[in-house]
């Protein structure tokens, strides 16, 4: 199954995690090389972009590994049942709902690079409390809930600021190459991160494995701190950043744009359907693998890492399929295939090689088609959103799409406690199909081979105008 979606996506990790959430597998190197090749040579000659790319890579690896380690820690070391695991995942996802809009408006008003460094160092400090508490013999569920909440909040800060930083660091004519490079990195992290997390749990025990996640966030902060280029004032000469505008007005401007644009509204609604069901599914899935199928930690990491190679294939296909079949066909078809394949999982039994191979195949297919959805949805979002509203639109879509995740996690835990792991997993997998059904009925299904054109917004009203 995939690793959890990062808050920055519109549909998982967009929000469709291609998300859960063993040693890192060598194919992660393929993802890193693919991300390098995806940017033209001139971009890689930019020293500051290289440091930014290195920092984002380390942060993604740390985040993906953490999303594997913390739930496994709760299940294996603290013996959490479905209810408590659902609460843990809900607490981890709650900051997306609570803080996304505020952080998005704040990032659009300020230089965003320092947000990245502070968020990385903050996550390192928070996560370091887990192995320290374990060594002192005071590790318990209350501490883990606090760590999950604070880490989730800092991840919201990093993910929103990262999108704004890219736009301010890379020239406009190289944004496509920069986005492609960083998407390749994310795919590589989806290979190496879960495998790394599962391997660390197997080798060091879950509490001590968190120390490895700390290291990646420290490396990310150091890399981003090496960027020397002066960060421009947000909003540029046009003054569209609304520096004189109150934060509440800026938040409303982002909300109006998402609510008033048919494409953005459809992306957010489809993501909300998906994230609610996916959060329920993942809560049950994290229990289903070790308890119903009796898979060890290393096998869990290997199974989850299979999503990453699929995401690499999806990234390659995303450059060709929309141009051939149209964005609408790709979105609806890929979403239906990605979500539909998960219905196979509840039928599996045992922990043998055949079961592991089937799980890896399911996750590979999920990663392939889910990445097609992610890349297409991100392209649509970037195409229709004015540059000065990118941070707020990302934050709004994160809140709309992933804000229902906490409720989904609680529902998944409650279903598993009430009717058992296998029936709950089947119900959650069936609920995933709501997202492609909605997409098929939305304006996105009618998109052709070209992206919709960007129209600027009235800076005083936030309205769209030709």
Image (tube, rainbow, N blue to C red):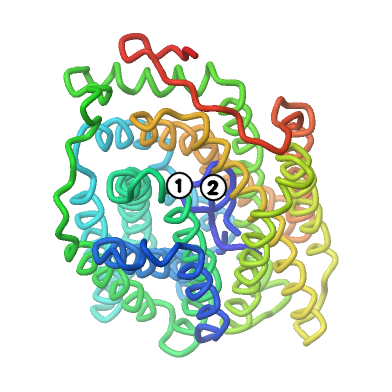
Residue found 43% across the figure and 78% down from its top: 206
SS for callout 2: loop
- Crowding at label 1, few (<14), some or many (≥20) Cα neighbours within 10 Å? many
Q: In this view, does 178 lie above or below 286?
A: above
Name the element at disc 1.
Answer: loop
Query: Residue shown at 60%/69% (left/top)?
Result: 308
Residue at image mark 2: 14
Q: In this view, does 131 lie to the left or right of 316?
A: left
The reply to whether residue 307 is visible in this rendering is yes
Q: Which residue does the image show at 61% across and 27% down from the upper left?
A: 263
**Residue 81 placed where, x, y %?**
57, 62
Give the percent coordinates (x, y) of residue 389: 37, 29
**Viewport quadrant of the N terminus:** bottom right
Residue 61 shows which numbered tag? Answer: none
Towards the viewer: 165 or 339? 165
Give the Cα separation between the discs numbered 2 and 1: 6 Å
Q: Position of residue 344 (x, y in %)?
A: 83, 62
229 shown above or below 33: above
Question: Contact (CB < 8 A) between labels 2 and 1?
Answer: yes
Q: Where is residue 260 in the image (x, y as percent from the top left)?
A: 53, 16
Q: Quadrant of residue 302?
A: bottom right
Which residue in the protein does label 1 denote? 8
């Amino acid at each position: 199954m995939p690793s959890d979606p990062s808050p920055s996506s519109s549909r998982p990790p967009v929000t469709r995690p291609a998300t859960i959430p063993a040693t890192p597998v060598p194919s992660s190197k393929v993802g890193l090389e693919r991300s390098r090749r995806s940017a033209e040579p001139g971009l890689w000659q930019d020293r500051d972009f290289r440091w930014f790319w290195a920092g984002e890579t380390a942060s993604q690896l740390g985040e993906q590994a953490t999303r594997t380690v913390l739930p496994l820690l709760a299940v294996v070391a603290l013996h959490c049942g479905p209810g408590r695991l659902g609460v843990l995942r809900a607490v981890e996802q709650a900051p997306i709902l609570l803080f996304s809009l505020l952080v998005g408006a704040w990032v659009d008003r300020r230089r965003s690079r320092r947000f990245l460094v502070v968020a990385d160092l903050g996550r390192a400090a928070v996560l370091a409390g887990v192995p320290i508490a374990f060594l002192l013999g005071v590790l318990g569920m209350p501490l883990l809930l606090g760590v999950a909440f604070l880490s989730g909040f800092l991840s919201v800060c990093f993910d929103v600021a990262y999108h704004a930083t890219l736009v301010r660091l890379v020239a406009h004519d190289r944004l496509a190459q920069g986005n492609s490079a960083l998407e390749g990195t994310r795919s590589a992290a989806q290979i190496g991160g879960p495998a790394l997390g599962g391997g660390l749990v197997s080798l060091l025990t879950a509490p001590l494995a968190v120390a490895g996640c700390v290291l990646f966030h420290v490396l990310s902060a150091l890399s981003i701190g090496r960027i020397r280029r002066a960060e421009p004032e947000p909003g540029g000469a046009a003054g569209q950043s609304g520096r004189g505008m109150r934060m509440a007005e800026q938040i409303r401007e982002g909300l109006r744009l998402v609510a008033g644009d048919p494409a953005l509204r459809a992306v957010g609604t489809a993501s909300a359907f998906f994230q609610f069901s996916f959060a329920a599914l993942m809560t049950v899935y994290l229990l289903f693998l070790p308890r119903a199928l009796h898979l060890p930690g290393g096998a869990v990491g290997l199974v989850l890492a299979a999503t990453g190679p699929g995401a690499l294939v999806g990234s390659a296909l995303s450059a060709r399929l929309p141009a051939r079949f149209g964005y609408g066909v790709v979105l609806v078809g890929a979403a239906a295939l990605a979500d539909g394949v998960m219905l196979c999982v509840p039928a599996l039994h045992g922990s043998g090689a055949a079961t592991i191979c089937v799980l890896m195949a399911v996750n590979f297919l999920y990663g392939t088609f889910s990445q097609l959805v992610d890349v297409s949805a991100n392209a649509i979002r970037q195409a229709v959103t004015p540059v000065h509203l990118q941070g707020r639109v990302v934050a709004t879509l994160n809140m709309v799409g992933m804000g229902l995740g906490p409720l989904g996690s609680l529902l998944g835990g409650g279903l598993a406690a009430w009717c058992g792991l296998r029936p709950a997993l089947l119900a959650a997998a069936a609920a995933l199909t709501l997202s492609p059904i909605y997409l098929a009925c939305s304006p996105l299904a009618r998109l052709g081979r070209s992206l919709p054109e960007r129209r600027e917004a009235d800076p005083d009203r936030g309205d769209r105008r030709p």
